[in-house]
Image: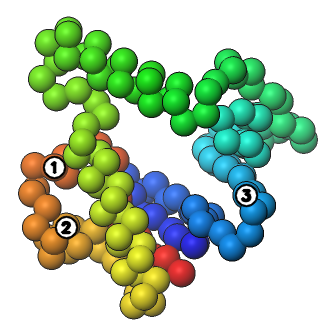
Amino acid sequence: MAAVFEMTGDLLVSYFGTWQGQTQMNEFSWRTDCTKGALLQSEQFSDLAIIRPDEREPRPVPLPEQERLVDDARLMLTDVAEQLLAGVSMPEPSAIDHIKTFALVAACEASSVSGRPVVMAEFYEEHGVPQRWLTASVTPAGVAAT
């Protein structure tokens, strides 16, 4: 799937990838470009590097050893529990964040089927998503996927 997300605040995100393949080979490559450089990752949960605009080669970023798909969930749940113990009534990330992620995936599917961009405000309204759920500082404004 390829998608372009136009975010609030004039932020554009380009996504290309698949979570499902027809072979046993699983390729992984993430690149996050920012105004002062890019983060590159060629192995999930490891092999992270950074490169600045004036550099020719990326520099490795050391990461601690992790148990894949366990340690990240454990850290997130620990963080949420600590927020609750500290009296935070709406810890982050919230279930609403996960629902918005599912909505974004569904909007990508709808865009791919229709061949047209999806305006997220219209998509949320069409599917009855409460306005109070959409108050995050950076939310997808629209998506176009193929």
Q: Compute the Cα span from label 2 to label 3.
A: 33 Å
What is the number of the mark on residue 75?
Answer: none
- Residue 67 is situated, as x and y percent measured from the top left of the image, at 62, 27
Which of the pair 7/106 is nearer the observer? 106
**Of labels 1 and 3, the one closer to you:** 3
Is there CB contact under 8 Å for labels 2 and 3? Answer: no
- Is residue 54 visible in the rendered image? The answer is yes
Q: Is residue 31 above or below residue 66?
A: below
- 58 relative to 118 in the view: left or right: right
Extreme front residue here? 24
Q: Which residue is mark 3?
A: 26
Residue that appears at 90% across and 41% down: 56
Quarter-of-image position of residue 101: bottom left
- The crowd level at tag 2 (other Cα within 10 Å; few <14, some 14-19, many 20+) is some
Q: Compute the Cα span from label 1 to label 3.
A: 34 Å
The quarter in which the C terminus is drawn is bottom right
Q: Is residue 51 above or below residue 108?
A: above
Amino acid type at image mark 1:
Trp
Residue that appears at 16% across and 28% down: 90
**Of labels 2 and 3, the one closer to you:** 3
- Residue 34 is situated, as x and y percent measured from the top left of the image, at 61, 44
Amino acid type at image mark 3:
Asn
Q: Which residue is mark 2?
A: 124
Which of the pair 38/63 is nearer the observer? 63
- Residue 80 is situated, as x and y percent measured from the top left of the image, at 29, 23
Residue that appears at 40% across and 65% down: 105
What is the number of the mark on residue 133?
Answer: 1
Q: Secondary structure at mark 3?
A: loop
- 6 relative to 97 in the view: left or right: right
Q: Secondary structure at mark 2?
A: helix
